[in-house]
Structures are given as C-alpha cells and as structure tokens.
Image (spheres, helix red, strand yellow):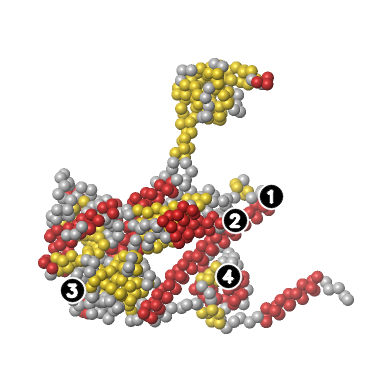
C-alpha cells in the first residue's frame, strides 16, 4: 500500500472535521439555564467559541479577553446569543408574568385624595442614645416602657397609639433605637413616618445619632420637630443646641427658620402639651388622608419575631385600607392568612384602619422588617407572589455568585500566566526579583471567622448583622454566613462549624478558623451549648447591643497574635575585655562590665551599642558575679558577660538588656 504523506493526512482530517461541523445544525430554540459558561453556550448555539468570546468581551465592555469558562447569567447570555445566532429563539427560565407579581401601590388623583377621610399622623421619635426618647413615650402613654428596656436603651422599634385632646385625636408613635448599631432601623422609621420628633438632651447637645437622624429625616423629606429634653437640669444652654442645629441645615423658628422647637422634660412631663399641639398642627398642615374602605389593604412590616404559642408574628403599620382577621396578605417571601390581630395594648381587635400599628398572627414564615405588606384575593395568589419574589431574590444571589466565580477564575488565570512567564525565565516563580504572591480568597495568616446572627425580631437581626459587617481587621476574614429569628439551636452550631470547615478546606493555604453564634435578646439551650463546646464554636449572647458588640470584639481580639513589646530594662558598660579559660581547654572572650542602670537578666536578649549604633543583638550565654554564675545582676554590681554567638565587643561598648512581653491586641 502506498504510504500517505503527513500533509495529505492533515488535509483529510481537516476536511472530515468540516464535514462533521456542517452536519451540526444550529437549533431553532434554546432554553437557557440561570448560568452558563461561554464554552457551553457556544456548544449549545453551535457557533465557534472564539466568536462568542469576542462578542461577550465587546458587549460587556471588558478590557481583558474572555476565557472559555467565563460564566454568564441568563440575561447576558441571551443578549450575546442574539448577536451571534440571531435565528435562534432564546428563552430565559422562569420569566415572571404580571399575574404572579404583587399589584403596584395604590395611586389617586388630587381630587380623589382630598375626598378621603383624615387619618392620624405617624410620628417617629428619633435622637441619640439615652437622650430620653423612650421616657418621652413612657410619659405620653403613662406606662412603664422605659424601665423595662434592657440596659435602659430601646432595642427595637416600638409602635404605640396615643390619644390627644381628650381622646378626640390620635397619634401613632414609633420609638426607634438610639444606639449606633441600629442605623438601618432608624432609616426605616424615617421612611414610614409623617413627622419626626428629634429629641436632643439639653445637657448633651447634638451627638452622632442626632446628626444621623437629621440626615434620615432630610433624605426622606419628612418635616421635623425639635424637642429639647431635660430642660429641668441646672446649668444648661438651650441656645447652644439651637445654634448647633444650624450646622446641619436645621433652623428653628426663633432663629428665622421653619422648624418648630419645643422645650420639654420627658421625666417630669413639662412642655408635653406644647409638643402634642405642635404635632397636631403640623399634621393638619400636611392634610394626611387614607381610605379605610380601599379595595385592598397596604402597609409595612415594622418588626417580626417568633412567639411561643403564636408562631411567626409581625408588627404591621397599616397605610391604606383596613386589615381584618381572615385577610390574606403577602410581605416579601412570606404570606399570611390573618389568624388574629393584637393592638399595641395587647388586646385582640377586629380591624386595623390606616395609621394603626397592629400585631399580626398567622404568618407561614417570619417576614423581613421593612417589607411592603399587600392584601391579595386568595391563598393561591399569595403563594404565586411569594414564588415570584423568591425567583427575583434567587436571580440576585445567582448574579453575585457568578461575579464571585468569574473573579476567582480570572485571578487563577492571572496567577497561572505569571507563574508560566516566571518559569520560562528559569527564575522559580520570581519576576524582576520579587516573589509572586498568589491572589487567594484567604490571605496568608488570616483567621477565618464565620458568624451566625440570631435575634428576637427581624429588625434586630438586620441591625446586628450590619454592626458585625463594620467589624474588620486585615488578619481576620469575617463573614456572616447565616442569620435568623429565634433562640440559638443545635442547627445554628452545626452551621457555624460547617462554615469554618468549608472555608478552610477551600483555601490553598493552611488557615485557622473559628465559628461564632452571636445572639441578641435570645438564649442558647443546654444541648446547643454542649455541641458548641464540642465543635469549638463560641456562643455570645446579650440583651444590650453595645455589650454584645464589645464581647464579640474582645473575643476576636484574642484571635490576633499578641504584639511583642520590647522594653530596655538595664544597661552595663564594658570596662575590660579578657579571656576566660573554659572547660575542655576552650578559651572564650568575656566582657567585664559594671551595671549602670536597672538590671540584666539571663533570660532577656541584649543589644550591644557602640558609639550610639547597634552592632549586635542576641541572647546572653552567661552572667558571672565574681566566680559564681547568676541569673540576674542589678545596678552598681560588676559582672562578666559572655554572649551566645558574639565576642567582638570592645571597651566602652554599652550592653542593653531587652525585656520582651506580650500585649493582647484589640480590634479598636
């Protein structure tokens, strides 16, 4: 048989490939998954991968070349596919329909609005921690709320209805926390309110949370009333506070502005009638109206929690329509057939009209705080709305995951390229004399800290998670891996332990790891505590937010290697240098010294100084006082010193004793 030349054989193989490719016909229709790599998309569309890579780079405006394993979400993949395979019909999974989504918020024309009945104003009390917000509400309601708060600080939003003018008028008050960790809850309070009462302590003035409250009120476009509290205290300067407020664009009426300012003593009840009148006057000017007979109820969740005997409950502020037992409502990814309504006084009620805060019993899951609440016509409609919301959230999570995957793969590709280039130069991983440090999700020496956040209500979960997110240190990798409402359980411990194990297993470097379960206003049962001890997971609980955060920071500080503090504790001057006949005929140099200050201890390192410059540092080999070997020699004594690894000392050298101690580090 005649032998075929290599060139002819190559041409035959190329022709066979072209024939095989020609037999593959592009599909007429493609259903895209939520995420797909460039290589798989090219295979699905039957197009050259290089063409797809170029189109992806162009469409996304990327500066780098797109690798074959670069991941695209369904929306981006459909846009790329439309360019490279215009005849293929692309379908994106789980497309939402109008029937699945919640109806839009109720809108009315000006004429329709003015025909509606007036409703009570919703007033949010805001201000710095311990400036008297809860005491003010306590006095208004004539109850003992202030004394019952843990640590004397409001822990989550409280909602109450207060009757004014002999019961003829009503005001709904929201009391937001003042501690720094609860910024998101204060922002939510500002966004659901009609009027903000800014409480400023006369003896303290404008403080960080005061400034933040002003910012939230101004961002929400909500009118403000300034209540200068604690005016009964001696030696206060009320004018100073009013001048301070000018720095934040808050100009009170007496200084020519339009912000009402009332001077009160929440503890003694002084000036409260003036405050009530100011609120009602401002409410009349706003012309606040709502329709209690609206076709559907709309509102917002203020707080949510799990209660023994009641299950998942939430405090809902009704904004339009009327909520009744038996109604079906949706909030985020949770729905509810209202089993019971409980008033702010703890009594069951048959209906909740606009501007009424009410506890709703009957939720299938704990609804997130700050979610829009909408009444729907049936349980089936509620389930469809929840599925639609879950799909939207899943897509958002998928987008985040895709971005993380692409970043990791790009970093790996960059690392491989640098290492390959370095290897080709024969430098063993070096480039330009600098050792390459791979980009890893975990930095060398970092400790992985995985946290589970638990709290009594959903708003507090959010606040604690936000506070934890602000805790950082370059030697710690801190992440909240899960959060939820309710007491600390065994599953929380298992999840924290699993997260630390997975994080370390996924790293290319040896890492230390620890898990924390941080519980606010909740307890940990004995089984969970025993499991935590077995797995090395730490459980921290407290009923006061700043104490909880202080405990967490203190425990995280213990994870950091201590600082080594070096202190000069003694000095000796070399007066003479002589040889010492040692055992086995060895001869070594010894420095004859006199201790001029402090003391020299054999356990401490020393440094040898010559004319102000350090010439050596290391351990002492021996200290001799006359012929006796000692561990320490004090000021005023003469001694002979031998050093471990150094004998080039001279007369006039100064030997300085260095004491090293460990100092615990903190995150602050």
* Mark sitting on residue 88: none
Q: CA distance from mark 4 to mark 1?
A: 34 Å
* Mark sitting on residue 118: 3
Q: CA distance from mark 2 to mark 3?
A: 66 Å
**In front of the other: label 3 or label 1?**
3
Q: Earlier in the sequence, mark 4 or mark 1?
A: 4
Q: Which residue is mark 1?
A: 426
Q: Earlier in the sequence, mark 2 or mark 4?
A: 4
Question: Which residue does the image show at 11% across and 66% down from the upper left?
Answer: 165
Q: Which residue is mark 4?
A: 38
* Mark sitting on residue 415: 2
Q: Earlier in the sequence, mark 1 or mark 2?
A: 2
Q: Earlier in the sequence, mark 3 or mark 1?
A: 3
Q: CA distance from mark 2 to mark 4?
A: 21 Å
Q: Is residue 529 visible?
A: yes
Q: x%, y% of residue 392?
A: 43, 72
388 displayed left or right of 314: right
Q: Secondary structure at mark 1?
A: loop
344 displayed left or right of 374: left
Mark 4: few/some/many CA within 10 Å (<14, 14-19, 20+): many
Question: Which residue does the image show at 23% across and 73% down from the upper left?
Answer: 349
């Amino acid at each position: 048989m005649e032998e075929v030349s290599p060139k002819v054989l190559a041409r035959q193989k190329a022709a066979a490939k072209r024939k095989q490719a020609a037999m593959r016909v592009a599909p007429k229709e493609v259903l895209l998954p939520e995420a797909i790599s460039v290589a798989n998309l090219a295979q699905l569309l039957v197009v050259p991968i290089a063409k797809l890579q170029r189109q992806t780079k162009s469409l996304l405006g990327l500066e780098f070349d797109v690798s074959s394993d670069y991941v695209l979400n369904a929306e981006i993949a459909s846009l790329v596919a439309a360019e490279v395979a215009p005849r293929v019909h692309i379908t994106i999974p789980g497309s939402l329909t109008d029937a699945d989504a919640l109806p839009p918020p109720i809108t009315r024309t000006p004429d329709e609005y003015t025909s509606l009945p007036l409703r009570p104003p919703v007033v949010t009390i805001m201000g710095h921690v311990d400036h008297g917000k809860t005491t003010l509400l306590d006095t208004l309601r004539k109850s003992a709320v202030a004394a019952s708060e843990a640590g004397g600080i409001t822990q989550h939003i409280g909602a109450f209805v207060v009757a004014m003018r002999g019961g003829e008028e009503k005001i709904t008050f929201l009391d937001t926390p003042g501690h720094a960790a609860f910024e998101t809850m204060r922002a939510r309070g500002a966004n659901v309110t009609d009027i903000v009462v800014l409480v400023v302590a006369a003896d303290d003035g404008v403080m960080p949370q005061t400034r933040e409250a002003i910012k939230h009120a101004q961002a929400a476009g909500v009118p403000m009333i300034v209540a200068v509290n604690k005016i009964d205290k001696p030696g206060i300067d009320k004018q100073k506070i009013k001048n301070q407020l000018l720095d934040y664009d808050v100009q009170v009426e007496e200084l020519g502005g339009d912000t009402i300012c009332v001077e009160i003593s929440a503890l003694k009840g002084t000036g409260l009638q003036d405050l009530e009148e100011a609120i009602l006057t401002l409410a009349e000017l706003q012309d606040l109206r709502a329709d209690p007979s609206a076709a559907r109820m709309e509102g917002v969740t203020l707080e949510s929690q799990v209660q023994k005997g009641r299950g998942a409950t939430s405090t809902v502020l009704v904004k339009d329509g009327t909520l009744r037992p038996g109604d079906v409502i949706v909030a985020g990814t949770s729905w509810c057939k209202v089993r019971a309504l409980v008033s702010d006084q703890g009594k069951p009620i048959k209906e909740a009209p606009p501007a009424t805060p009410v506890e709703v019993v009957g939720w299938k899951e704990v609804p997130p705080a700050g979610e829009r609440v909408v009444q729907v016509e049936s349980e089936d409609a509620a389930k469809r709305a929840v599925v639609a919301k879950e799909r939207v959230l899943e897509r958002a999570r998928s987008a985040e995951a895709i971005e993380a995957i692409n970043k990791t793969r790009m970093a790996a590709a960059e690392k491989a390229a640098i290492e390959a280039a370095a290897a080709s130069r024969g430098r063993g991983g070096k480039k330009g004399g600098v050792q390459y440090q791979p980009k890893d999700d975990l930095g060398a020496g970092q400790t992985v800290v995985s946290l589970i956040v638990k709290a009594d209500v959903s708003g507090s979960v959010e606040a604690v998670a936000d506070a934890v997110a602000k805790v950082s240190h370059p030697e710690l990798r801190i992440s909240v891996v899960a959060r939820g409402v309710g007491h600390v359980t065994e599953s929380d411990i298992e999840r924290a332990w699993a997260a630390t194990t997975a994080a370390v297993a996924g790293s290319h470097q040896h890492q230390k790891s620890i898990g924390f379960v941080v519980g606010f206003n909740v307890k940990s049962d004995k089984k969970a505590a025993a499991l935590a001890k077995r797995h090395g997971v730490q459980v921290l609980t407290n009923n006061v937010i700043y104490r909880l955060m202080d405990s967490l920071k203190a425990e995280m500080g213990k994870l950091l290697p201590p600082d080594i503090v070096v202190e000069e504790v003694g000095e000796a001057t070399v007066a003479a240098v002589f040889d010492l006949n040692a055992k086995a005929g060895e001869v070594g140099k010894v420095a004859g010294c006199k201790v001029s200050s402090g003391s020299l201890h054999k356990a401490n390192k020393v440094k040898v100084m010559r004319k102000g410059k350090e010439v050596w540092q290391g351990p002492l080999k021996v200290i001799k006082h006359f012929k006796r070997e000692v561990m320490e020699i004090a000021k005023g004594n003469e001694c002979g010193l031998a050093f471990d690894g150094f004998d080039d000392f001279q007369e006039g050298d100064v030997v300085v004793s260095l004491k090293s101690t460990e100092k615990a580090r903190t995150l602050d």
